[in-house]
Amino acid sequence: MINAPFLDRDLMRDVNANAAGGAGPDGLGNLPEWDLSDLYTSENASELERDLAWLDGECASFAADYEGKLTDLDADGLLTCVLRNEKINAIAGRIMSFAGLRYYQLTTDAGRAKFMSDMQEKITIFTTPLVFFTLEINRLEDAVLESHFAANSDLARYKPIFDRIRAMKPYQLSDELEKFLHDLGVVGDAWERLFDETIAGLTFTVDGEELNIEGTLNLLTEQDRSKREAAARELARVFSDNIKIFARVHNTQAKEKEILDRWRGMPSPQMGRHLSNHVEPEVVEALREAVVSAYPKLSHRYYELKRKWLGLDRMQVWDRNAPLPMETSRTVNWDEARKMVMDAYSAFDPRMGDLAEPFFDKGWIDAAVKPGKAPGAFAHPTVTDVHPYVMLNYLGKPRDVMTLAHELGHGVHQVLAADQGEMLSSTPLTLAETASVFGEMLTFRKMLENAKDKTERKILLAGKVEDMINTVVRQIAFYDFECKLHAARAEGELTPDDINALWMSVQAESLGEAFDFMEGYETFWTYVPHFVHSPFYVYAYAFGDGLVNALYSVYAEGAEGFEDKYFEMLKAGGSKHHKELLAPFGLDASDPTFWDKGLSMISDMIDELEAMED
């Protein structure tokens, strides 16, 4: 049950669309910054020293008290063991949350980077003796565990955790090998660090201006087509110049995964991700098939519409996230953004507004774009006896308002789930997007309701469709690319050209006939962080979006008691399987038609956009 703590980031769903770079425009208002003192006041705080010392001693005591003895424990003894383990998780998580959040505020600061690395190393060393715990849990007989659960209801509450641990039982290695792999983890992320540092160090020159990758990607959403083209060609040039490094990182990471999976006896490269997401492979495959089958009525149809709006014979990759011709550059100041999101949340249910309010007033949001700050946006739950923190790079674009709504949804979800405790509060990736995407949808519907005219409604609808395509279609295409990459790497080393070809094999299929692909676009796989940091992570975005679209359709139909059921679902955190959580709404993700329900919401919006052309 011990996991080396890490900062759980909500990575950018589509880095082309959501990247932010450079200083924000004037007139945004007073943007909030984090107050991390609820975790620790500084890296030299006496409380931090106390917690490190406690963690060191408690991990050693835990191992001495329980290693080789779990089979001898009765139900009460096993509960005491679980509660001690939970406290270790909480203290370790608090330390790493503080170290990680400070680092992401200023990633260029060597002192902060060193502090985070030092804390991770200490905690890895402290917790290595505890690897035995999950291994011995998996050696308990089913009948013994069931009798323990029957004898102690407080212990039975943790059954979902035991179930998840025991799902790994068929793939477990020897105690010695598992300890070796845990210990090796402190240096095993070297290739990820190389990727991050290489990406962060890239420089791009567009129209005489030197930019980093976030600033360059941001130009792909500019109204000026020549600027978009210049940015795309410069991205391709720089990626091509560095492609050998990126190919080496991907080759090594994929080979390491293949070796680990082979030793564990995993039936597929994707299986480890499915287990951590607590989702059945056939459910993911049903999602994938539904989305791929829907490409013609979703992305193909939408981009053909967009091609006409842009007045082009053919679209290029730099047109994918272009604003519409009638779209004006509008800056939404912070107070206005706050009101838009809070109005949408409170209109759904006043309790939602009450839960969101403290994020704005108590230093739980860091919103400004600052030099050295990590790109993108995330909500980090920290630990259950503190509160979540939200990071944004707010530039005042309408899309930034949607990002605020999204991350605030995560925050509300994390607050509600905190009562489950440290081990049961965390949701798998497939369910973690529920409240965030639902919060986005509430905000979007509120904005649509307040649209002044047909043109504004069209711009809002088109923007939402693009976001959903980026979240569903594009991420499934990413997933297919990863599946092909890992299958090909199992057969031998891949050249940059090999990987380029795999990338292009999914692009035309997902984007459709409206596009031509410039020379150099075949290298755009290089900068997607998910492929390196979290193999097969990407399908969780499509899963979450499809789930929420189906859920929202139930809400829109006026289902009785929806709000109360929704809050109960969020409060459950990770204590229930997706089947249990969706049952009160009459939904079932294992039913192949479930995904069609969600995808039809996107299709209906495209129907409305097509009708506006008549």
Image (cartoon, rainbow, N blue to C red):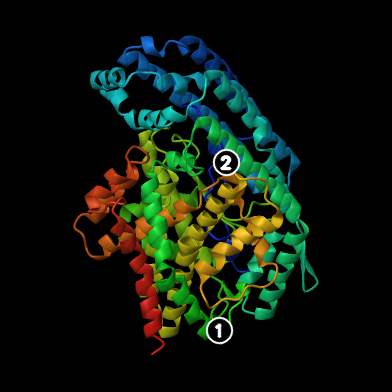
Furthest toward the left, the residue is: 560
SS under mark 2: helix
Does label 2 or label 1 sit earlier along the sequence?
A: 2
* Amino acid type shown at disc 1: Leu
Labels 2 & 1 near each other (Cβ < 8 A):
no
Residue 150, given in percent of the width and then of the height, sits at 23, 21
Q: Is residue 67 above or below residue 227?
A: above
Neighbours of disc 2 within 10 Å: few (<14), some (14-19), many (20+): some
Identify the residue at image location x=74%, y=61%. Answer: 240
Furthest toward the front, the residue is: 491
Q: Is residue 22 above or below residue 314?
A: above
Frontmost residue, 256 versus 589: 256
| Image quarter (top left, top right, bottom left or bottom right) of the N terminus | top left
Frontmost residue, 332 versus 483: 483
| Image quarter (top left, top right, bottom left or bottom right) of the C terminus | bottom left
Q: In the picture provided, is 532 more to the left or to the right than 537?
A: right
Mark drawn on residue 273: none
Residue 15, given in percent of the width and then of the height, sits at 59, 60
Give the residue number, with chain letter if any, for mark 2.
36
Q: Quadrant of residue 46?
A: top right
Mark drawn on residue 310: 1
Residue 560, given in percent of the width and then of the height, sits at 18, 57
Q: In the picture provided, is 152 more to the left or to the right than 221?
A: left
Q: In the picture provided, is 581 more to the left or to the right than 396?
A: left
Identify the residue at image location x=40%, y=78%. Answer: 451
Frontmost residue, 78 versus 491: 491
* Amino acid type shown at disc 2: Leu
Q: Quadrant of residue 162?
A: top left
Neighbours of disc 1 within 10 Å: few (<14), some (14-19), many (20+): some
Marks 2/1: CA–CA distance: 46 Å
Residue 392, given in percent of the width and then of the height, sits at 56, 55
SS under mark 1: loop
